[in-house]
Amino acid sequence: MASTSRRWWWWPWATPPPFSSSASRHHKGEGWGLGGPALVKAVGWLLLAGLLFRVLCSFPSSTSSPEISEGKCNLFDGEWIPNPSGPAYTNKTCRFIDGHQNCMLNGRPDMSYLHWRWKPYECELPQFDEVRFLSAMRNKSWGLIGDSILRNQVQSLLCLLSKAEEPIEVYHDKEYRNRRWHFQSYNFTVSLVWSPFLTKSEVFENENGQSTSEIQLHLDILDPIWTSQYETFDYVVIAGGQWFLKVAVYWENDRVIGCHYCQDKKLRELGFEHLYRRTLQQIFRFIASSNHKPAVLFRTWAPDHFENAEWFNGGTCSRVLPYKKGEYSGKDMDRIMRPIELEEFRNAMAALGGSRNSANLKLLDTYSISSMRPDGHVGPYRYPFLKGDKDAKSVQNDCLHWCVPGPIDAWNDLVMKMVLG
C-alpha cells in the first residue's frame, strides 16, 4: 500500500508500574472481589449451557489471509470454545499482574471472558503445563523483546510459571521497562527487553507518553539494547508494530531521509509501512547471519477492538462474547500491517531454504485468535472502577491491551506447543 499522509494516533501511556503485589493493589479489594473462585466456576458452568448454541453454529470458514501452519496442524486456525473450568490462575494467586491489566481487581463485573479456550480445528492445544515447561527449560534463558503488548504477554507467562515456582526478580531498570526474573530451582531466566521500534531510536516522551519532540528512528541500525543481549538467549520472542504509527523522523547512513507525519517540517513523507517493512527485513537478516542460533518466535500484529471511535476520542470495547469465525474482518490498520509481516516472514524463510536456521525461526501468529476476542481487553478497567464512578463510556478505554488472566494466556499455550511439541 502506498504511504499515507493520515495521522495515526497511538497510546498516551509509556511507563509501566512494577509487576508487584503492592503495585497491583489499587483499592481495598483483594483477589476476585466478586465472590471468589467458587463463583467463577459456577458462572462458567452456566455459561457453557447458554453459549453451547454459539459453538454448534460456528463452523470453519475460509480466510483470505494466508496462514502458516505449525507442523501437520495449523494451530492458528480454529475457534474459541467454552471452558467452564475458568483460568489457570487468578489475581489472588499471581502477584505479577500489572495494575493496568488487573481487570477483576479494578472492578470489571463480568466474568464470561475468562471461560473460553482456543481450539484449533485439526488438533488439541493442551493447557500450559508449568512443570513440564520449566523442566524442559532448565539452565536456559528466554528473551522477550518488544513493546507493552509483549510486556502484557510476559505477565501471563510469569503467572503461569509461578504456579510451579515463584521467580526472583534479579534486575530492573529505573523505569521497570527492562526486567529479568530467575527461577532458582531450574536455573531458568526470563528477560523482558523494552524495544518498541526494534530499531535504534531516540524517544522524547515523559512518563505519560506526551512527546516534546519527534521520535528519531534509524532505519539501518537495529536497537542495540536487544542485539547486545541476543547471544545470551536460548529462546527469543520478538514483536512490534504499534509504535511504528507514531510521528517520527527517519534516518539512514547518519542523515535524515524522511518522516512520518511531520507537518511542520519540509521532509519527504515515507510512511510507517516503509519503516515497518525495512525493520522486519533487518531483523530477519540479523537472525540469519548471527552465529548464535536461538529458537526465535516472531509474534504477529496485535489487533485492537475500539468501536465507535479511537482511544483518544471516546472509543470503547464493551462486548462480552468472542466473535465467531468469520464474524470480524479486522480494521484498516490490520490489513496494512499483517500482510507486511506475512510477506517478510515468508521471504525470510525462503532465503533460509532448508537450512538449520529455518527450523529455528517460527511464526507465532496470534493475530487471528486475538482478533476474535473483543471481550478480553482492559476497556475502562485500567484503573479501579468502583461503584458510584461514572459509566464506562465516560472513562478512557484501553481496547488494545489484554486483561490478565484472559485471552492472552492462549498465546503462551501456543508458545509451549510450538517449543515443546
Image (spheres, rainbow, N blue to C red):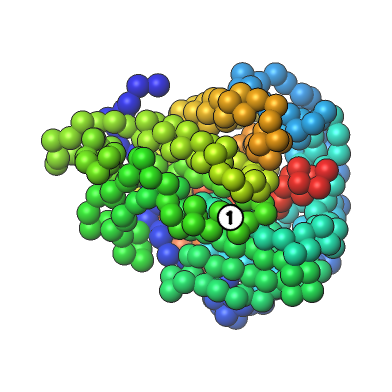
Which residue type carries mark 1?
A: Glu
Counting from the top left corner in percent of width and height, residue 220 is at 36, 40
**Camera-side residue of 419 and 126:** 419
**Camera-side residue of 413 and 355:** 355
Q: Is residue 92 visible?
A: no
Quadrant of res 32: bottom right
Counting from the top left corner in percent of width and height, residue 202 is at 31, 55
**In the displayed structure, does residue 327 sit left or right of residue 26?**
right
Which residue: 35% across, 63% down?
208
**In the displayed structure, does residue 45 sit left or right of residue 22?**
right
The C terminus lies in which quarter of the figure?
top right
The N terminus lies in which quarter of the figure?
top left
Q: Above or below — where is 357 with respect to 230?
A: above
Q: Which residue is mark 1?
A: 231
Counting from the top left corner in percent of width and height, residue 351 is at 58, 26
Which residue: 60% across, 76% down?
170
Counting from the top left corner in percent of width and height, residue 209 is at 35, 59
Outermost residue to the front: 291
- Secondary structure beneath label 1: helix
**Camera-side residue of 148 and 361:** 361
Which residue: 72% across, 66% down?
188
* Mark 1 neighbour class, 10 Å CA radius: few under 14, some 14 to 19, many 20 or more: few
Q: Is residue 73 visible?
A: yes
Which residue: 37% across, 50% down?
200
Q: How many marks?
A: 1
